Image: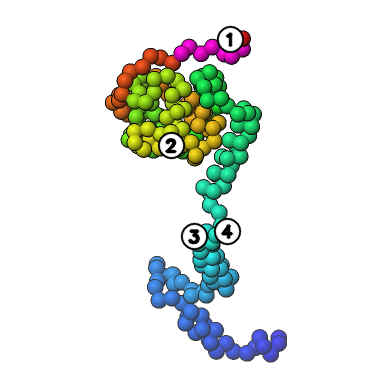
Amino acid sequence: MSSIANQPNDGSEAVSSMENLLDHEYDGIREYDNPVPGWWHLLFWGSVVFGALYYFFFTFSPVSWTVQDRWERAQAAAYQRVFGELGELKPDAQTMQELMHNPQMMAVAKGMFATNCAQCHAKDGGGINGVNLTDNSYKNVRKLDDIITVLNKGANNGAMPAWETRMSQNERILLAAYAASLRGSVPAAPKAPEGTEIPPWPEFVPAAKKE
């Protein structure tokens, strides 16, 4: 046998192990005080530093971006593609009716309405501070394309803001068509009618049939 194997155990290792035991005990079992690995500390402090840099970059940096920014850019690109296919729209009733009967255009307009108009007219057009767009009564509209004029110039001494300088002509016409399409729908909490009841919108006749 080697000389090392024959050396007596003085119990120092056992004493050292006992010193590393934690004070609490459960069912005769005591926990060993094993030190936290160094990489845990690195991960923790790295997360703290990253979090601080992330916060200050996205809160105060002029070159940062947000999810909202990316969404707006994506939305603008989508609108540009859609409107590029349409060309320049005419601000008249025929154009509005053609848009009202185009499901793809109305789907785009629905998103625009939710972003720009829902805070006053409600997402379903039932009205909050703004008028109910689903009934047959209107304050400043007597015919279909009057909605474009209201969008352009505003109404009610500024209660309805003018959008002429805030949106392109195509966007305004598309929004006007969507607002007109809400007439006759059933909102969740409709506001009481305001203004004067007007006749139904003219029957839609596609431009090809008119020719």
Q: Nearer the viewer, residue 53 or 129?
A: 129
Marks 3 and 1, how far apart at CA: 57 Å
Indicate the amino acid at tag 1.
Answer: Lys
* 4 or 2: tag closer to the N-terminus: 4
Q: Element under label 4?
A: loop
Which of pointers 2 and 3 indicates the residue nearer the eye? 2
Task: Tell me where residue 30 appears, x and y as whole percent.
Answer: 44, 72
Per the model, the C-alpha gap separating discs 1 and 2 is 33 Å
Callout 1 crowding tier (Cα within 10 Å): few <14, some 14–19, many ≥20: few
- In the rendered structure, find residue 59 and report the number of the disc placed on it: 3
At horizontal 35% and vertical 19% (from top left) the residue drawn is: 136
Which picture quadrant has residue 2? Answer: bottom right
Query: Where is mark 4, residue-wise?
Result: 63
Estimate how packed mark 2 is, as few (under 14), some (14 to 19) or many (20 or more) residues with alpha carbons within 10 Å. some
Q: Quadrant of the C terminus?
A: top right
Cα–Cα span, label 1 and label 4? 54 Å
Circles 1 and 2 in contact, beta carbons < 8 Å: no
- State which region is magenta: 202-208
Residue under label 2, please give it. Answer: 162
Magenta stretch, main secondary structure class? loop
* Horizontal and vertical percent position of residue 95: 54, 21
Q: Is residue 27 magenta?
A: no
Where is residue 10 drawn, in percent x and y? Answer: 55, 89
Q: Which mark, by number, is residue 30? A: none
- Distance from the alpha carbon under mark 4 to that under mark 2: 32 Å
Label 2 element class: loop
